[in-house]
Amino acid sequence: MKKLVVFAIFCSVFSSLRAQQTASFGVSAGINVANMSFSSSGVSASFSSLVGFKGYVFYDAPLGGNFSLQTELGYDGMGTIITDPNSGNKLTEAVNYLTLSFLPKYNVPQTGLSFFAGPSIGFLLNAKSTEAGQSASDTDSYNSLDLFGVVGAEYFLPMGLGITARYMGGLTNVAKGTTSGQSAHNSAFSFTLAYKFNSGK
């Protein structure tokens, strides 16, 4: 009888551990509230945030304990709105990336809450400038790669529906052909809704 009880407990614990270690995958979509920071002598302009689309698919693999690694493949709409302080004219600069992210996560036990931080690589898809209703490609003005530092949090309900919030800070100069002392860096606050197809935690 004692052996049977021990075996039942062992099976219960093993099943629980397997459930906790189950990988999950899903999709997420929302917005980037993006901007650019410029460094250049003699430039006078103000910059406003540009709202762009953010979407990604993700795979969350357990690492042991309460930690996991979330890998994401996504689309990130970045850019800024530049206003000439003299004329008041506005130039919208939209820069779009295919992003690959590797985000170690800490999953707070029995809460659905997680915190993550890690790198993201952005591959330039295209860039477009729009002024006075006229648009033109501006892809040649940007470097083909950007590296981001990402930090954020997410909360998932047991049914698999979740919300996420993060900050993406560009670590590299994205402007092509700049001289010494000139640079441009992307940044964005992101807010998305997400769904896990397999929520085993």
Image (cartoon, grey):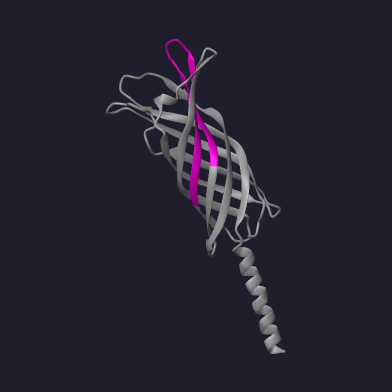
In this rendering, the count of numbered labels is 0
**Could you say where residue 155 lies in the image, as x and y percent from the top left?**
62, 50
Q: Left of 154 or right of it: where is 173? A: left
Give the magenta part as a residue range: 74-103
The residue furthest bottom is 1
**Could you say where residue 46 lies in the image, as x and y percent from the top left?**
43, 21
Q: Quadrant of residue 43?
A: top left
Q: Which SS does the magenta portion mostly show?
A: strand
The reply to whether the magenta stretch includes residue 24 is: no
**Could you say where residue 70 lies in the image, as x and y percent from the top left?**
53, 52
Q: Quadrant of residue 39?
A: top left
For image coordinates 46% across by 49% down, the residue present is 118
Which quadrant does the N terminus fall into?
Answer: bottom right
Which quadrant does the C terminus fall into?
Answer: bottom right
Of residues 190 and 3, the one drawn nearer to the viewer in this rendering: 3
The reply to whether the magenta stretch includes residue 95 is: yes
For image coordinates 54% across by 46% down, the residue present is 72
Of residues 64 and 87, the one drawn nearer to the viewer in this rendering: 64
**Could you say where residue 11 lies in the image, as x and y percent from the top left?**
67, 76
Rendered position, 90 above or below 15: above
For image coordinates 50% across by 40% down, the residue present is 99
Rendered position, 10 above or below 175: below
Q: Left of 182 or right of it: where is 98? A: right
Q: Left of 100 or right of it: where is 13? A: right
The residue furthest left is 180
Rendered position, 61 above or below 121: below
